[in-house]
Amino acid sequence: MRISSLSQPQRMLTTLETSNTQIQKLQDQLSTQQKQTLPSEDPLNAARTAALTQQQAMTAQYQQNITTANDALTRQDTLLSSMSDLVLSLQDQLRSMNNSTQSTTNTTGHTAQLTSLSEGIVSLLNSQDEEGNYIFAGTNNHQPPVIKVKGEYQWQGNDETQSVQVGQQQSISGSTAVSSLFAAGGDTLSFLNKLGELSQSASQSPPDTTTLSALMQQSSDASAQVSSARASIGSRKNQLTQLFDRYTDLTAANSEVLNHLQSTDTVETTLQLQAWLKTVEYSSKAYGLMNQFSLFDVI
C-alpha cells in the first residue's frame, strides 16, 4: 500500500485549523457569556431568540398600556367617588327640606348648600388630567364637557370611548361615559338644572313637596348611575390586573427560555474548551513527529 507523504500532514493541518476555530468560538462564548455571536452560527436558535425577543417587547408594551389605562381609570373612580359623596349630600339636603317646616331663613340656607354642591359636581365633571385634557368629555376632550349658558348647564362632551390595546386582539375602554348620570327627559344635566331652578324659585317661596319628592327621586337615580359607572370601572380594573399578572408570568417564562437559548453554560463550555485544547495538543505533537518521519529512513 502506498502512503502519501503529503495527504497525511494536510489532513493534520485541517484538524488543527478546525480545532483552533472551535477553541476561539468557545473562548468567545466564555468571554461574552453568549452562545452565539452571529445568527449564522445557529439559524434555528437565532430564529427562536428573535421571536421571543419580539414577544417580550410586545408584552412590555401591553403592560405599559395596562398601567396607563389603570391609572386613568383609578383617577376617574376617585372623581366619581367624590361625586357620589356630593350626590348623597344633596339627598340629605333635599330630605331635610322636605321634612322640615320651611321658613325663608331655612330655605335660603338649604338652597345655598344645594348650589354649592351642584357647582362641586360640575367642577368634578370638568376635571382635567395632567395634560390638560378633560377626563369626562369623551373624545371631545379639548373643551369642558359642561358649560353654563344663560343660567342653564349644557353638555358639550360625548360618550365616545378611548380604547387601549392590551393584547394582540384585545382592547379595553380607558374612559368612562358620564352623560347619563344626571339625565332625564332628554336633558343630559336635568338634575343639576332642576336644582338651579329650585334655588331660584325658593328665594320667593318655599318649594312644594311634589317638587322636592321629584328631585329626591332624581338624586336617587343619579346616585345609582354613579355607582354603576364605578362598578364598570372596577370590573375593567380587575381585568387589567389579571392581564398584567398573566403578562408578568409570561415575561418570566420567556426570560428563562431566552437565557437558555442565549447564555453560555460556563461549566459545559469550559469542559468543551479543555477537550479541544487537549485535541490541539495531541494533534500538534503528532504533526511534529510526522514532519520528522521519512520513508527513506527505513529504506
Image: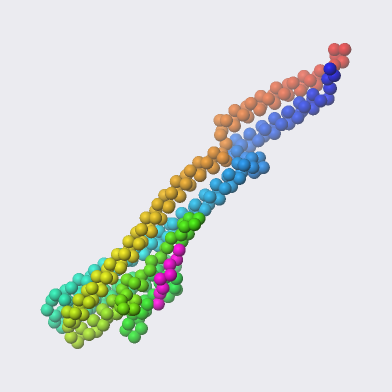
Which quadrant would the C terminus be assigned to in this image? Answer: top right
The picture places residue 66, in percent across and down from the top left corner, at: 44, 57
Tell me: residue 152, above or below residue 134: below
Q: Which residues are magenta?
A: 156-163
The picture places residue 127, in percent across and down from the top left corner, at: 37, 70
- What type of secondary structure mainly makes up the magenta span? loop
Tell me: residue 108, above or below residue 256: below
Task: Find residue 1 and report its image quarter.
Answer: top right
The outermost residue toward the bottom is 204
Foreground: 225 or 50? 225
* Residue drawn at 37 percent across, 55 percent down: 238
* Residue drawn at 19 percent across, 87 percent down: 204
Residue 118 visible in this rendered orientation of the protein:
yes
The picture places residue 79, in percent across and down from the top left corner, at: 33, 66
Q: Is residue 25 left or right of residue 175?
A: right
The outermost residue toward the left is 101
Q: Is residue 154 left or right of residue 58?
A: left
Task: Find residue 68 and report its image quarter.
Answer: bottom left
Task: Find residue 163 and report its image quarter.
Answer: bottom left
Tell me: residue 202, above or below residue 240: below
Q: Is residue 229 left or right of residue 162?
A: left
Foreground: 30 or 107? 107
* Residue drawn at 77 percent across, 27 percent down: 11
Residue 87 visible in this rendered orientation of the protein:
no
**Is 162 in the magenta?**
yes
**Is 3 in the magenta?**
no
